[in-house]
């Protein structure tokens, strides 16, 4: 199974549509969002495209709007933790490596900086999927294959529609 990981979409519906086209072709049904969706209307669009959604709130999110529109999204205030196909996955918006014990996770995702990042810390893959909005840096996201346990960072503009 494949899981999509995005963050910092900042209401960019044009980039989200390109991303949705990719995830439909790949038959990806689970999404982890690292925060900064922004408005509830954007979350409604995201919900049309995935069966399971896990969202950690970011600093630019309009909290009341997101909670009002969420139907199938599990929202976490500061840090999310889920287990999918035996993989322990953690995620948050703002991350401080000095304050986080990663031994408990196979994968840990963070965002906020908009800069894509991928590194192994201890036995955990630590990654920032970048930002899907394309603010400050190219629009990027990540795909996790739960069978191979391989994480891949992707650039949105290189995805063929």
Image (cartoon, helix red, strand yellow):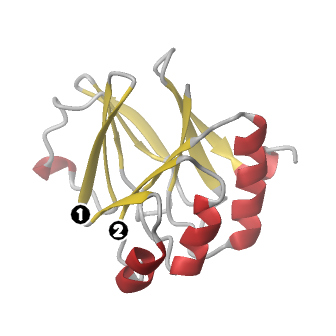
Which element is circle 1 on? loop
From the image, which quarter does the N terminus lie in? Answer: top right
In the image, what residue occupies the spot 51% across and 66% down? 8
Crowd tier of the residue under label 1, counting other residues whose Cα lies within 10 Å: few below 14, some 14–19, many 20 or above: some
- Is 106 displayed left or right of 127 in the figure? left
Percent of width and height locating residue 33: 46, 56
Q: Which residue lies furthest to the top in this view?
A: 148
Q: Report the front residue among 29 and 8.
A: 29
In the image, what residue occupies the spot 65% across and 42% down? 154
Residue ID for mark 2: 57
Which disc, if any, is residue 78? 1
Percent of width and height locating residue 115: 50, 56
Percent of width and height locating residue 95: 27, 56
Which element is circle 2 on? loop
In the image, what residue occupies the spot 17% across and 31% down? 104
Crowd tier of the residue under label 2, counting other residues whose Cα lies within 10 Å: few below 14, some 14–19, many 20 or above: many
Percent of width and height locating residue 87: 34, 26
Q: In this picture, is 59 found above or below 25?
A: below
Q: Report the front residue among 93 and 55.
A: 55
Q: Pointer 1 and pointer 2: residues touching (CB < 8 Å)?
A: yes
């Amino acid at each position: 199974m494949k899981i999509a990981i995005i963050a910092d979409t900042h209401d960019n519906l044009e980039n989200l549509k390109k991303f949705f086209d990719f995830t439909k072709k790949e038959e990806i049904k689970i999404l982890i969002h690292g925060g900064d969706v922004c408005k509830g209307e954007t979350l409604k669009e995201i919900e049309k495209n995935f069966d399971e959604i896990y969202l950690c709130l970011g600093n630019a999110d309009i909290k009341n709007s997101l909670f009002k529109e969420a139907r199938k999204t599990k929202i976490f205030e500061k840090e999310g933790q889920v287990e999918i196909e035996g993989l322990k996955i953690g995620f948050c918006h703002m991350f401080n490596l000095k304050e986080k014990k990663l031994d408990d996770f196979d994968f840990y995702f963070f965002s906020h900086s908009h800069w894509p990042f991928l590194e192994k810390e201890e036995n955990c893959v630590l990654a920032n999927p970048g930002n899907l909005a394309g603010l400050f840096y190219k629009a990027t996201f990540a795909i996790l294959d739960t069978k191979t346990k391989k994480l891949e960072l992707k650039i949105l503009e290189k995805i063929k529609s």
